[in-house]
Image (cartoon, rainbow, N blue to C red):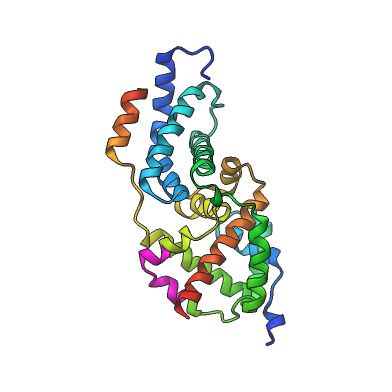
Amino acid sequence: MGVGLSDEENRKQFAGIVVPHLSEAFAVASWLTGNRTDAEDVVQEACLRAFRAIGSFAGVNARAWVLTIVRHTAYSWLAKNRPSEIVAVEDFLGEERLTEQCIGGWSATVTSTPETALLAKLDVRRLEAAIAALPLAFREVLILRDLQGLEYREIAEVTTLPVGTVMSRLARARRRIIGAVRTNDA
Amino acid sequence: MTNDSTRVPDDDSQLVHAYLDGELDPAHAIVVGRKIAASPALAAELEQTRALRQALREHLPPRTLPPHLRSRIRSCRG
C-alpha cells in the first residue's frame, strides 16, 4: 500500500516502474479478456492496484511485477464477468490425451510438413481465432512467451507456476494451435 | 514405420520446445539436439513449432495501447 511513501514519491515510482510497461500490459489484458474494451477496464484497474502496491515492489523485474498484477486483475475480471473461462486445467488434459490418441501422435515427416506450409501462409484472423480458442491456462503462457517474449522463469513468476509446468503448457498450447490449423484445413 | 514407432515420450517432446526457445543449459541442449536428429517425429515437431513462432511474430499485428488510456492513466497517476 505504498507504506511510508508520500503521494508524490508514489507517483514518481509509478511513472518509473509501471508506465514503461503499459503497452505490454494492454496487449496481455486484451488477449486474456478477448477484446480491447474489456482490456481497457482491466488495465485501468491494474494500474490502480499497482499504484496502491508500489511500495511493495522489490526492485528486481518491473515488467514481471506489472504483468503479474495485470494477470491477477484479468482473472478477477473474468471470475466476475465470464466465470466459465476459468476452468480447472485438468479438465482439458484428459480431453487432450484422447485427441492425441485419435490423431495418432505427431507426423513423422521431417521436411516441409503440411502443417509447416499451412502455418507459413496462415492469415491473421485464423491465427487469432486459434489463440482465442485456447483455454485460458494455455493461452496465457503462449501469449507471454510467443507474443511478449518473456523467458520461462519470468512466465513462472507472473503465473506462479513451476517452470516445468510453464514448459508443458506452452508445448500443449502450441500443439493445439498447430492441430487447429490442421483440422481447419482438412 | 508404424504409428507406435513415431510416438515420442511427452517429456522429450516438451524439451523440443525448450530447446527451440533457448531455455536449456548447454549440456542439456546437446542431448536434446541429438534426440531430435535421431527422431523424425521430434524433428517434425521442431519444424512445426518454429513455423508457428514465426507466424505469430510476423502475422499478428501488435495490440497497441489506446492513446486516450495512456493519457488517462498518466494524468491520474503522475
Left or right of residue A171, residue A2 in this image: left
Front residue of A3/A82: it is A82
Vertical arrangement, residue B26 with respect to residue A40, above or below: below
Left or right of residue A16, residue B6 in this image: right
Front residue of B16/B61: it is B61
Across and down, in percent, residue A166 comes to: 62, 52
Front residue of B78/A79: it is A79
* Dominant secondary-structure state across the stretch colored magenta: helix
Q: Which quadrant of the figure has residue A58?
A: top right
Which residue is the extreme one toward the bottom?
A: B1
Please report the residue visible at 41 percent of the width from the left and 59 percent of the height from the top: B57
Q: Which quadrant of the figure has residue A89?
A: bottom right
Please report the residue visible at 43 percent of the width from the left and 51 percent of the height from the top: A34
Residue A118 in the magenta stretch? The answer is yes
Residue A112 showing in the rendered view: no
The part of the chain drawn in magenta is: A116-127
Residue A69 in the magenta stretch? The answer is no
